[in-house]
Image: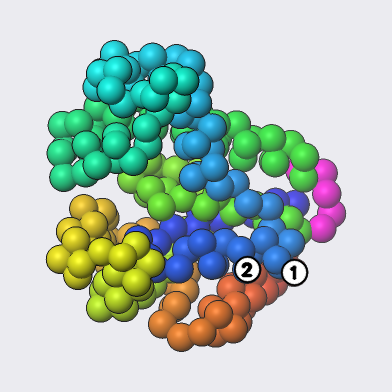
Amino acid sequence: MLKTIGLTGSIASGKSTASKILKEQGCTIIDGDVIAREVVKEPQVLFEIRDTFGKDFLNEEGELRRKKLGEHVFNNSPALEKLNQIMHPRIQRKIKEEITCCRRKFQSSKTRHFVVVDGALLIEMNLHHWVDEVWVVVLSKKEQIRRLTERDSISEQEAERRIAAQMSTEEKLAYADAALDNSKDRQYLKEQINKELERLRNQDSQ
């Protein structure tokens, strides 16, 4: 038996911490960031990026200059849209393939297995349609700004711009089956995650 969970959250909300806890609890993790890094190494993807944005965005070895491209598309909606058109279909396809693979692997199992799709853009990429539940990690904007400025050594104004560039937590919550409050310590977050996993396990006996 298999239950798929889509895990998402706004920048600096603690989604990665939640993902690590879920892995510790035995969940299989499909990491959207890892898949994106794999996709961007594909020769065809690099060719399209060079063709779209110019050769300056690749280094002498033909690899992507991730920071340079990131700075170029940030606050540049047309450029970001072009990049998304290159990247998102491939990322979606790979994630769907991994979910399908997990379904086949666990479909005949008599015990409950959890597969977690960890993706900051889970909803924006319409991957929430491919999972049984959506879990959103929640943190106040004030705390997001504090953590983001400390983590990335940026100004509060820059942190606010990065937060504003993404779908808001409130918008994500409209899709949520569970909200994970990350305003306290790791143990508090872990307790909520275990409670939600137990809720799903109990569904099997109903």
Sequence-first tag of 1 and 2 = 2
Q: Which of 137 and 49 is in front in this view?
A: 49
Report crowding for label 1: few under 14, some 14 to 19, many 20 or more residues within 10 A (C-alpha).
few
Left or right of 107? Residue 160 is left
Seen at 45% across and 68% down, the residue is 14
Q: Which amino acid does label 2 sit on?
A: Ile
Residue appearing at x 20%, y 67% in the figure = 155
- Give the label on residue 205, or none: 1
Residue 180's place in the image compared with 97, above or below, is below
- Residue 62, position in %: x, y? 44, 19
Q: Which residue is drawn at 31% across and 26% down?
A: 57
Name the chief secondary structure element in magenta.
loop
Q: Where is residue 6 in the image (x, y as percent from the top left)?
A: 51, 54
Tell me which colouring the rendered structure shows.
rainbow
Asked if the stretch drawn in magenta spans residue 110, the answer is: yes
Q: Quadrant of the C terminus?
A: bottom right
Q: Residue 21 carries which label?
A: 2
Q: Is residue 128 visible?
A: no
- The reply to whether the magenta stretch includes residue 175 is no
Query: Bounds of the magenta span?
Result: 107-111
Q: Position of residue 42 (x, y in %)?
A: 50, 21
